[in-house]
Image: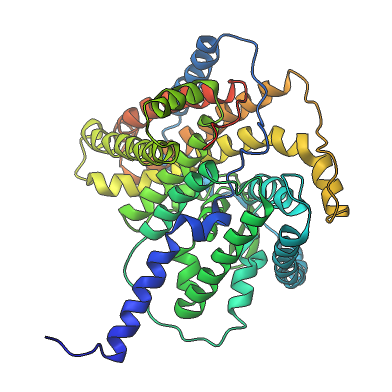
Amino acid sequence: MTGPPTPGERGTRLDRLIVVLAACPLLAGTAAAHVGALGGAGTPQPVPFWLVALTGGGLVGGSFLFTSLMTDHETIRSVNASRLRMRSVAAFARTVRRGARALGVLGLLAVLAVALVGPAGSTNAAVLVVWVGWWAGYTATTYLVGNSWPALNPWRTLTELIPATERDLPDVGAWPATVGLLGLVWLEVVSPVASDPRFLALVVLGYTVVTLAGGARFGDAWFERVDPVARVFRLYGWLAPVQRTADGLALRVPGGTLPERELADRSEVAFVVALLWVTTFDGLVSTPAWNGLVGSVVDLGVPAPLVYLAATLAGFGVFLGGYRLASRYARRTAATYVSAVAIERRFAPALLPIAAGYHLAHYLGYVVGLSPALATAVTNPLTSPALQAVVLPGWFGGIALALVVVAHLVAVWVAHAIAFDLFPGRLQPIRSQYPFVVVMVAYTATSMWIVSQPFARPLAV
């Protein structure tokens, strides 16, 4: 027999318990906010899929051939390192930061209040603000402009008001955030979080409790390593043209900082791949082909939530396995002594433009289409107006397809810059990219197929 746990042991157990709770999908529902229940964002293209996929894949492959002509290491570095200092904006940015902190807290309280006492249904202002305004609209600003979430984050602001009892965070890497992110997309699909404001309030409250407890317990380390929301926005912020430097704010080439980034370990690589997968899966579940497949499995007696959970995990496994396989083959084609794990960590940031591009392609039409409903709901939060939507023209779907292709072209350039930063000479960096280009072409075809499909409401669970 052993005696009762000492205070130190109890503290360690509590630390681990908080970290495990952070990975629970139910308690982190707000972080995912992967909309889909309110409607589709894409406009299907009236052209054959084989032509769309062939064009997109051909452009990605062609861009690789084009970038291969640029083989001067210093020229590549100078393109990515170019910047324009924004000293005159620094003082203004500090003022905006103070206002953003207050706005974030007020926004959180308003979402909770309206979700609890406002009208039921998907026209509730809290539902529209979270899905249309926050996850679809605000998220796009983190990679199109800059990551303002550290200033806006209401939970981080509230954590500073709680008496600190900071302890060292257990060495869990990015796995809690990865598990949480995967669970989030599953929760969005199998629960009414995107249509039932009362359930949304429950999820936000649960997330708030866990985040405040984790932030008070572990301080900034919680938001930097465990919180999926902060991690997603931070990674997307690496793409943005506005970057924070030691000298203040600076304008950079979009994605220009990615070749400078190196992930700490394989758990961070897994999170990047998970982010890539959930953006794909969020669109996949809204296609007729997916509904037909899930319907067939459910007819066999398998519960729909279990089907979606298996698909979420299996898809992540396929994406992660494919990326790791490409990293191993890159080591062979480059004939290098650099380990496959090191190659994984260095090339993973090149996947972020793809994730951001697909997010923008999937939700651009969604934000434009539902912007009137969002404006009406915000100005009249306690009423239940009819769901107003802008009818998008047929050519709008071409914009979504173009965004997917442009994102993959940026990814090809980033991978090219990383290769020339990692490997010496001219031939070795080019050969190291062969496996990654194959993966990118395959993913381009998949993404464009999803974007070109008509919207189908996910199968009811």
Question: Residue placed farthest to the left in the image?
Answer: 1
Q: Is residue 152 left or right of residue 238?
A: right
User: Which quadrant holds residue 42?
Assistant: top right
> Could you tell me which residue is drawn at 37 percent across and 33 percent down?
302
How many callouts does the rendering have?
0
* Quadrant, the N terminus: bottom left
Q: Is residue 223 visible?
A: yes
To which quarter of the image does residue 351 belong? top left
Q: Position of residue 91 (x, y in %)?
A: 75, 71
Q: In this view of the protein, which residue sits in the foreground, 365 or 354? A: 365
| Residue 292 location (% of width, % of height) | 48, 21
> Is 416 situated above or below 204?
above
Image coordinates of residue 153 in percent, x first then y, are 63, 65
Above or below for 180 versus 153: above
Q: How is the image coloured?
A: rainbow
Q: Nearer the viewer, residue 50 or 93?
A: 50
Q: Along the horizontal axis of the image, is 386 left or right of 69?
A: right
Q: Position of residue 417 (x, y in %)?
A: 44, 40
Q: Nearer the viewer, residue 161 or 173?
A: 161
Residue 63 seen in render: no
* Direction from residue 405 to residue 345 in the image, left or right: left
